[in-house]
Image: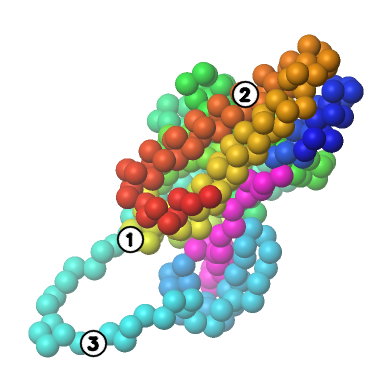
Amino acid sequence: MRSRINLIACGSRLFLAVMLAVLSCSIAYGEEYFKWTDENGNLHFSDSLESVPEKYRDQIESDTFGEKQPAPSKPRHKSAPSRKPAVEVPSTPIIPKRYEVPYNPHGGSEKRIIVTAVFNGRESAELAIDTGAPGTLISPSLAKKLGLFDQDQAALIVPVGGIGGVRPAIRSIVDTLQVGGAVNRFVPVTITPSVSESFEGLLGLDFVSNFAVTIDSKRNVVVFEELPLDAEHPGGHDREWWSGLYKEFGSQGNAWRGYREAYDDEIADSPYANREDNRNLLLLIEYQIREAGKLMDKLDEFARENSVPMTWREY
C-alpha cells in the first residue's frame, strides 16, 4: 500500500491504475441455473431443478454465468418423505403468475432478445436479455435520466472486466425494474457505456433467475413465470445473493478506508501533499468512502424490510 502511494506522489498517470488495483474485489456474484429446449424448439431457463419438467431432465444444462457443468441427476436438496394425511382435504393448487413480454429479435448485426424495461416506474429503456451477465448493466444516459448521479443517490466507482480489458464503471441501486408484469425491487446496476446503439443495457441473470423463463422464438415473446416465495428467499433472493452484495459493498468500503489511512501516513504530512494530483486523490478517496457507505445503508434497509438473517449480512 505504501509503495503504491509513493508512486502516485511521483506522477498522476498512475492514478487510475492504483484505483483499480485497490478495488480488487469482484462485483460478480454467481448463481446456478438450468436451461432446456422443449419439443417445439423453445428455450427455457430456471434456477430451480424442481421446475424442470421430468421429461426434459435428461437434456438440461446447468450453468453458472456461462460456465457449463454436468446437470445433476436429482434435486440438490433432499426433502423429507411425504406422508399421506389421515383425511385428505381438497386444496386449490396455486397457479404461478405468467407474463408474456414481446421482444425485438434483432440488435444491429447480432440477433438479440431485446425487451422494454421500466425503471422506477417511470423511465422506459430497451434492454437485451443476457443470461451470461451476472448483473444488470445500464448506460450513463439512462442513469442520468434516473437521477442516479444525484447527491442523495449512491454511485461508487468500480473496475469491470471485458473484452477490451479492465475499465472504470459505476455501481448504484435502482428501486424497481419491471419487464411486462415481472417486477424486481432493489436492483443493483452497473453503469457503463452501452455496447450497442440498439439497446441501453443488459438484463442480467440477477433479474432473470427470479423467474422460470421461456423464450418462444416463433411468436417472439418471452414468458416470465413467478417462482413460489419461501423463507429461503427473503425479498425474492437467496443467501448467495444477499451475502454476495454484503461482501462486495463491505469490502469496497473497507478497502477505501484503509487507503485513506495509508494516505494520511504517507502523503498528508509530506512535501507532496499540495500536489494537484494528490489533492484529487484525497477527494476521490473521501468520495468513494461516502458512496460505499450509501450503498451499504440502502442494502441494510432492504435487508431489514425483508427480515434477512444476520448471518447472511456478514462481510
Rounded to the nearest angstrom, the CA distance separating label 1 from label 2 is 38 Å
228 is within the stretch colored magenta: no
Q: Quadrant of residue 200?
A: top right
In front of the other: label 1 or label 3?
1
Q: Foreground residue, 85 or 264?
A: 264
Q: Is residue 300 visible?
A: yes
Identify residue for label 1: 231
State the mark number for residue 286.
2
Give amino acid for label 3. Answer: Arg
Distance from the alpha carbon under mark 1 to that under mark 3? 22 Å
First reached walking from the N terminus: tag 1 or tag 3: 3
Q: Is residue 189 left or right of residue 311?
A: right
Q: Marks 3 and 2: in contact by CB < 8 Å?
A: no
Residue beneath the point at 62% across and 28% down:
288
- Identify the residue position indicated by label 3 in the image: 83
Residue 79 location, x and y as percent? 37, 80
